[in-house]
Structure formats: C-alpha cells, structure tokens
Image (cartoon, rainbow, N blue to C red):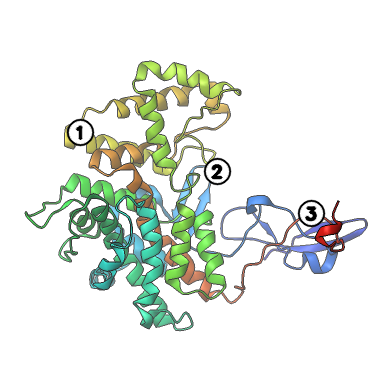
C-alpha cells in the first residue's frame, strides 16, 4: 500500500480511501469500506474497473500486449516449455527443477484414468450432445466418485483434487469426442506426453497402433500453454465466485466450464473460423472489410480485437507460426489460411482498424489449426476448457489460501418498483 489516498463521495460526505500498489500494473483504490463510510455503492457493470482479488499468477498489460505467467512472458513459455512445466509454474509459483518436474509429471500421469462407472455416465447422454454439455456433467460428477479430495480445508486434499482435475480433463474431453462419433473409448497411455496422450485418446482406435505426429503434438502443446490462464476473465471469476461459497473443487471447475461455453468467451475461435469460411477466398476480403466498417451492417470481423488487449495479442504471433507449421506438415493447401493471412495483412495496414486497435487475437488462427488437425468445431471450446483447467485450479487454490477471501456478494443499482401493497386478484384493474 502506498501513502496515497483517493477522495470519493458526494454531497459533502467525502472520504479518503487508501490506494494499493501491486508489483506492476495500475494502482487500485481500496473501496471495501466505501458503503460503510458513504452509504453508497459503486456501479461497474462487468466489473471492468474493479479488482476483485489479489493474485500473483497472471499479469496482462493490454496496452503493451504483454501476458506473463508468474512473471514469465507467454511467448517464451510457448516456445521452450512443456505443458507440464507451465502447469507446475501456475500451481506452485516457480518453474520446476528436473526432479520436481519428473515427480509432478509422474503424479499427473497416475491420475489420468477415470472411474470405470463414468463410462456408463457418458452413455446417458444423447449421441449428438455438445461436448461442453458432457464435460459440465462429467466434471461436476467427479465429486460423487472422489470423496477423498473434496475437503477444501485440507491442503493435501486440495492438491490431490488439483492433480486429478489437470490429469483427467484430457481423458474426459477425448471420451466426449469418442462418444459423439460412436467409437470406443481409449484408455490413457502414461508413457506419452500430456498432449500426445490426448491426441491418441482422441484419434486412436483399439484396432491399430497410433503414432503421435511430433508437429501436431508441438502445436497442441502450444495451444494448451497459450490458453492455460488469462487473469480474471469471466470463467475464472466464475470459478472463484463458486469457490468463495465453499463449493468442492469439481463443482467449481464445472461452473467455469459452463461459463466458458458462452460464444463471447470460449466460442470465439469457432466464430472466427466460420467467418473465414464465409469469406472464402482472399479476393472477397475487400467486400467484407467494407462491411465491417459499415455501422449499419451487422457483420463483424471475428478474431480481431480483445476486451483487454489494445495491442497485438502476444499469443496470436505464436498461433500464426503454428498454423503454418501444421498445414505445411499435413500438406494442406487451405484457402481459409490464405484468407486469414491476407485479412490480417490488410487489417494491420488499414487506418480504420489501426485507430480502433483491432488487432488479431489468439482465436484468429487457433480455429484454423484445430480444424486442420481434425477436430470438429464443436470440440474447440472443449479443448479450451481442457487447457484452461490448470489456470482455474491455480486460481481456485490461491483464492482458498487468501486470508482476505470472503463469499462473493456483488451489490446492485435497483431500478424496480418501490414498495407497494398486495391487491387481491379480483380487485386488480
């Protein structure tokens, strides 16, 4: 906390409130006593100007296009780290030493299987159920199978639950995909990497061996790392809010999955891919650029701009390079990628988009990559949930350990009717 204060109030009832200072980022006015001292609430729809917690996990500077996990730039982690290293970093706060990484990887690999009765649980869904609907149900149901890791007051149980969630999410997502296409479930192979194991469970079949393509494996590793955490976004805030009530960790992560399902959050890469398919070829881009500039046209460029980033999304450059690597390795000449590259080039040099700071974001290329690998579009958000689980787990653990944590209880600006008396139904005019 600095020695600075901010004076807030109205009608002569002005009060001084302390100004808090983090290690980086804007200063924060501490308004916890604002209502008690002034009798007023603050009004902040979407909480876009409100810090809901203290956190040491992820830092974003949207103006400069910076994303740090525990201080490490996202592009360095995506280029050099394994996903297990990033998981350890987010959960424990530091990059692991070799022995720590080996022990952590071993622990995660020993939690990859699901309770066998959960296979029956899957068969209760319709074949055409959305994978996110299945994941919400299955993750929420984990608390019915793993009673030994639901006591949130026990640090050891919290860590066991964290390991289970990180380990089992690829199995849950792969089984959701297999169920939708009528293929048998594939059990995990703990000799493979986290991403390699997921690819095998998703695309392998019992009838023949599955060989992991290292280019695809590297692409999935990068995608998982780039989506691992993103500060206090909607789904992470949902996990924290659910956790503030004392709910078990499996219920909290299921709540995060439900929030992520929204098209404004986790479904953005699917929307971006659909837009590129609609444009079709680079020659039609000027037509759609003109439509995007027309205020009366409902068309919007998907995959451009971000609620936080007012600069180039640091994750987008990695995605662009990865898209080229994947399509080149698979020998795919995809007009969607050609369209994406040309659209990005035009938008980055167009004054209209530059002035509005509409730069490509991570969703712009990730849909192209996932489509090329063979994932149907309805699996895109499920993959996002898989990767984001480690961030949710880290944020949940941090919240539970925070001595200042209390149950979430936002207030409101009430605009409804004032008090009125009940009138019997026969007397109502």
- Judged left or right of residue 125, residue 356 is right
Q: Would you say the residues marked 3 and 1 are in contact, meaning their CB atoms lie under 8 Å apart?
A: no
Is residue 95 visible in the rendered image? The answer is no
- Asked where in the image residue 334 lies, by quadrant, the reply is top left
Q: Would you say the residues marked 2 and 3 are in contact, meaning their CB atoms lie under 8 Å apart?
A: no
Q: CA distance from mark 1 to mark 2?
A: 32 Å
Q: Which image quarter holds the N terminus?
A: bottom right
Question: How dense is the environment of label 2, judged by Cα within 10 Å: few (below 14), some, or many (20 and up)?
Answer: few
- Judged left or right of residue 411, residue 286 is left
**Disc 3 or 1, which lies upstream in sequence?**
1
Q: Residue furthest right?
A: 12
Q: Nearer the viewer, residue 376 or 276?
A: 376
Question: How dense is the environment of label 1, judged by Cα within 10 Å: few (below 14), some, or many (20 and up)?
Answer: few
Residue identified by numbered label 2: 307
Task: Residue at 51%, 18% (x, y): give it.
Answer: 290
Q: Would you say the residues marked 1 and 2 are in contact, meaning their CB atoms lie under 8 Å apart?
A: no
Q: Residue furthest left?
A: 208
Task: Residue at 39%, 51% (x, y): give it.
Answer: 227
* Element assignment for label 3: loop
Task: Residue at 42%, 79% (x, y): give it.
Answer: 150
**Disc 1 or 2, which lies upstream in sequence?**
2
Residue identified by numbered label 3: 416
Image position, residue 277 (x, y; %): 35, 28
- Judged left or right of residue 133, residue 395 is right
- Asked where in the image residue 368 lies, by quadrant, the reply is top left
Q: CA distance from mark 3 to mark 1?
A: 59 Å
In this view, 166 is above or below 126? below
Residue identified by numbered label 1: 328
Q: Nearer the viewer, residue 76 or 344?
A: 344
């Amino acid at each position: 906390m600095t020695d600075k204060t901010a004076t807030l109030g109205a009608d002569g009832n002005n009060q001084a409130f302390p100004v808090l200072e983090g290690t980086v980022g804007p200063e924060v006015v501490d308004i916890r006593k604002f209502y008690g001292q002034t009798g007023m609430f603050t009004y902040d729809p979407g909480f876009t100007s409100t810090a809901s917690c203290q956190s040491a996990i992820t830092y974003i500077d949207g103006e400069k296009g910076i994303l740090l996990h525990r201080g490490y730039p996202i592009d360095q982690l995506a280029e050099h780290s394994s996903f297990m290293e990033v998981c350890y970093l987010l959960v424990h706060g530091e990059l692991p030493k070799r022995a720590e990484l080996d022990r952590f990887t071993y622990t995660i690999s020993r939690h990859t299987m699901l309770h066998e009765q959960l296979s029956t649980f899957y068969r209760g869904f319709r074949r055409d159920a959305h994978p996110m609907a299945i994941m919400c149900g299955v993750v929420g149901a984990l608390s019915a199978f793993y009673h030994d890791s639901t006591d949130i007051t026990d640090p050891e149980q919290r860590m066991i639950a964290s390991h289970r969630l990180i380990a089992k999410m690829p199995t849950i997502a792969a089984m959701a995909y297999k169920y939708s296409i009528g293929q048998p479930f594939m059990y995990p192979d703990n000799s493979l990497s986290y991403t390699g194991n997921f690819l095998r469970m998703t695309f392998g079949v019992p009838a023949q061996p599955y060989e992991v393509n290292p280019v695809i494996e590297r692409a999935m590793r990068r995608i998982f790392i780039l989506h691992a955490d993103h500060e206090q976004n909607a789904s992470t805030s949902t996990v924290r809010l659910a956790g503030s009530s004392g709910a078990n960790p499996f219920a909290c992560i299921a709540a995060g999955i439900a929030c992520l399902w929204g098209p404004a959050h986790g479904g953005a890469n699917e929307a971006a891919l659909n837009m590129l398919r609609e444009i079709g070829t680079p020659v039609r881009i000027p037509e759609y650029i003109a439509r995007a500039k027309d205020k009366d046209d409902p068309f919007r460029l998907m995959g451009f701009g971000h609620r936080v980033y007012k600069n180039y999304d640091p994750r987008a450059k990695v995605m662009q390079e990865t898209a080229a690597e994947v399509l080149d390795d698979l020998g795919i000449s995809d007009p969607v990628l050609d369209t994406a590259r040309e659209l990005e080039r035009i938008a980055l040099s167009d004054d209209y988009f530059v002035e509005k700071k509409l730069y490509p974001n991570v969703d712009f290329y990730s849909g192209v990559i996932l489509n090329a690998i063979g994932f149907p579009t309805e699996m895109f958000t499920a993959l996002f949930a898989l990767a984001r689980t480690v961030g949710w787990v880290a944020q949940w653990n941090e919240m539970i350990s925070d001595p200042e944590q209390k149950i979430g209880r936002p207030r409101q600006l009430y605009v409804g009717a004032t008090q009125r008396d009940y009138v019997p139904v026969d007397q109502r005019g």
